[in-house]
Image: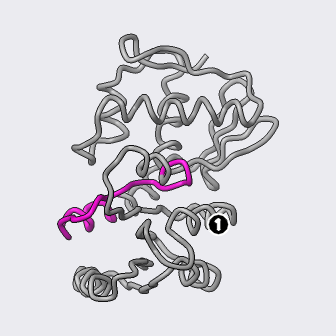
Amino acid sequence: MKILLAEDTRDLNRAICAVLAHEGYDVDPAYDGEEVIEHIERDSYDCLVLDIMMPKKDGIQALKEIRAKNIITPVIMLTAKAEVDDRVAGLEAGADDYLPKPFAMKELIARIRAQTRRKTEYTANDLQFNDVTLRAQTFELASENSVRLSVKEFELMQLLILNRDRFLSIEYILDKVWSREPDARPDTVWLYISYLKRKLKAIASSTKIEGDENTGYKLC
């Protein structure tokens, strides 16, 4: 399994690469955002681990370019800051997970395993609800227009479509979508619901997500 690790602190980069290689991963190092784009254009990866604060091009800029190329590889963002704004910026750019520094190597390895394992867990079939199509192969949500979803957005939308006839509680959604992330909280669900609402609007769909933290959520 191949990983691209982008971290501009060379000693830390070498240390993380050594640990991941010991775990059996094939790891390519990158030290700035421009190197990330160069790697992506000439090779394919199973997971990208990107530091937010990098020279030439930061992690957010690099990630936006990656997603603009319709590359759906799972991305984990590393950040020295744990503020909500930094997490939101990464998630809105298309990140699938984030890990604030300092972090334990065991946690990074667990998150990489979770992201790469998810790639094989989804139904291979496209799903339809009202005027919306969820495309399994490209992680796209389509109606009059189409937009790419992050891994967790895809998981959540898939869950909503497969349970279209009932409200899903916050606890149920957390258990199904964030079972491997013990730090996930109810406001995490609210945040991703808001992302999906925004993307449904962006593709000019008439489909809505109704409900709140008390009733749960469902498509209508």
* 203 shown above or below 88: above
On the image, which quarter does residue 113 sit in?
A: bottom left
* 46 shown above or below 18: above
Three-letter amino acid code at disc 1? Glu
**Horizontal side, residue 87 vs residue 101: left or right:** right
Can you name the residue that lies furthest to the right here? Answer: 144
- Count the marks: how many? 1
Residue 81, position in %: x, y? Answer: 33, 57
Residue 134, position in %: x, y? Answer: 64, 40
On the image, which quarter does residue 202 sit in?
A: top right
| Magenta residue check for 111 | yes
Residue 175, position in %: x, y? Answer: 29, 34
Q: Looking at the image, which residue is at 24% across and 80% down?
A: 23
In magenta, the rendered stretch is 91-114
Q: Looking at the image, which residue is at 51% across and 28% down?
A: 160
Give the quarter of the figure containing the C terminus.
top right
Which is more toward the observer, 21 or 56? 56
Secondary element at tag 1: helix
Which is more toward the observer, 40 or 156? 40
* 78 shown above or below 96: below
Q: Residues within 10 Å of mark 1 (few under 14, many from 20)?
A: some
Give the quarter of the figure containing the N terminus.
bottom left
Residue 97, position in %: x, y? Answer: 39, 54
Can you name the residue that lies furthest to the top here? Answer: 215
Q: Looking at the image, which residue is at 60% across and 45% down?
A: 125
Name the residue tied to disc 1: 65
